[in-house]
Amino acid sequence: MSEWMKKSPLEWEDYVYKEVRVIASEKEYKGWLLTTDPVSANIVLVNFLEDGRLSVTGIMGHSVQTVETVSAGDHRVREKLMDLFTSGDCKGYSPEDLEKKKTSLKKWLEKNHIPVTEQGEAQRTLCVAGVLTIDPPYAPENCSSSNEIILSRIQDLIQGHLSASQ
């Protein structure tokens, strides 16, 4: 098992939104690391091409030998990467509105005795009990978890919160 596969998702997060060089199966890749799959350790790299298009490359986690940071980038690169796959629902909200929605939902979950933390460098994602994440704009469909029972129950709680706040 490679060193990359032995790292935890929290350690992988140190590479997110940074320009990296990846050696995998005797081949070298370079690009901006968008995300790493927490189960398979697969890496998604993005390169901005000169004609304005994007090149997205997926690298299988088991083939990764080394990953090294080339550049930390700046806030413009981070914003471009963060906006790449932002849901269309999210684009209608200002950063202040999203922060209010996040804070309101977090308080609602805590009121219902659900352990919730903020995660990610931008602290945009809510993490419930370490097994479920809620991304902006913090609606039931923005939940992600491999545990379908917890996913369903938290989605129901969020729906109740949205109904109560309207």
Image: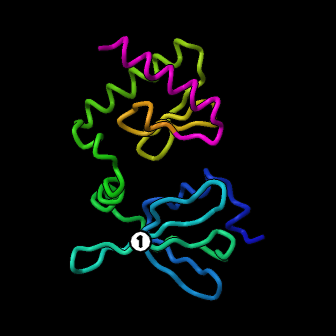
Q: Residues within 10 Å of mark 1 (few under 14, many from 20)?
A: some
Q: Position of residue 10 (x, y in %)?
A: 61, 50
Quadrant where the C terminus sits is top left
Q: Position of residue 37 (x, y in %)?
A: 58, 57
Q: Nearer the viewer, residue 150 or 5?
A: 150
Residue bearing mark 1 = 56
> Magenta residues?
144-166
**Color theme of the render:** rainbow
Q: Nearer the viewer, residue 156 or 67?
A: 156
Q: Is residue 109 above or below residue 138?
A: above
Magenta span dominant secondary structure: helix
Tell me which residue sits at (39%, 28%) in the image: 102
Q: Position of residue 4 (x, y in %)?
A: 67, 67
Left or right: 107, with 12 as reference point: left
The residue lying furthest to the bottom in this view is 26
Tell me which residue sits at (64%, 68%) in the image: 61
Q: Quadrant of residue 65?
A: bottom right
Q: Quadrant of residue 79?
A: bottom left
Find out whether residue 69 is within the magenta segment: no
Q: Type of residue at label 1?
A: Val
Q: Position of residue 5 (x, y in %)?
A: 70, 64
Tell me which residue sits at (45%, 47%) in the image: 121
